[in-house]
Image: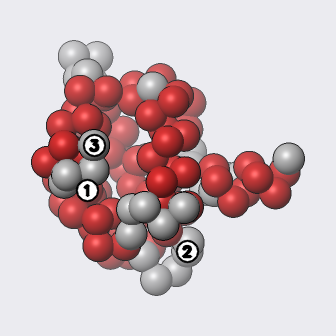
């Protein structure tokens, strides 16, 4: 349903590189990450740690968005930035990178 799409996958238009990110980290990983945030299994502090672990300007996006939009939408902005900073490179294994970050943050 449209409600489900907005609640679990964020507002349409928030994420510019959704397809690119989903390709790099895997559709299922993308959905599970957002569902875990929506269900409260991953909170704001953990998202902050994930953003820090992603490096580059990602944490700045978290700081900028965390109080403006929902946590799910904050993560969509973070994933967009992570794509621009790192995931776009052909030699970057997005699945391995994401799993490494989640393991480091004890989320796997």
Element assignment for label 2: loop
| Residues tagged 3 and 1 counted as in contact (Cβ below 8 A) | no
Where is residue 43, by image quadrant? bottom left
Element assignment for label 3: loop
Disc number at residue 69?
2
Which residue is painted at 45% across and 26% down in the image? 26
Disc 3 to disc 1, how far (Cα)? 13 Å
In this rendered view, identify the residue nearer to me: 102 or 89.
102
Question: Upstream in the sequence, badge 3 or badge 1?
Answer: 1
The residue sitting at the left extreme is 104
Q: Name the residue under label 1.
A: 50
| Residues tagged 1 and 2 counted as in contact (Cβ below 8 A) | no
Is residue 11 among what the camera can see? no
Which residue is painted at 72% across and 57% down in the image? 6
Disc 1 to disc 2, how far (Cα)? 17 Å
Q: Which of marks 3 and 1 is in front?
A: 3
Is residue 106 among what the camera can see? yes
Q: Mark 3 points at which residue?
A: 108
Q: Position of residue 103 (x, y in %)?
A: 19, 43
Q: Position of residue 36 (x, y in %)?
A: 48, 54
Please indicate whether residue 53 sits to the left or right of residue 60 in the image: left
Disc 3 crowd, CA 10 A, few/some/many (<14, 14-19, 20+): few
| Residues tagged 3 and 2 counted as in contact (Cβ below 8 A) | no
Q: Nearer the viewer, mark 1 or mark 2?
A: 1
Q: What colouring method underlies this structural image?
A: secondary structure
């Amino acid at each position: 349903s449209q409600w489900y799409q907005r609640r679990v996958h964020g507002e349409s238009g928030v994420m510019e590189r959704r397809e690119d990110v989903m390709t790099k980290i895997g559709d299922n990983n993308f959905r599970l990450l957002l569902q875990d945030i929506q269900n409260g299994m991953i909170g704001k502090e953990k998202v902050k740690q994930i953003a820090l672990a992603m490096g580059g300007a990602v944490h700045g996006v978290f700081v900028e968005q965390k109080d403006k939009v929902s946590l799910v939408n904050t993560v969509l902005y973070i994933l967009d930035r992570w794509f621009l900073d790192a995931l776009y490179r052909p030699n970057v294994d997005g699945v391995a990178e994401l799993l490494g970050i989640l393991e480091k943050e004890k989320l796997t």
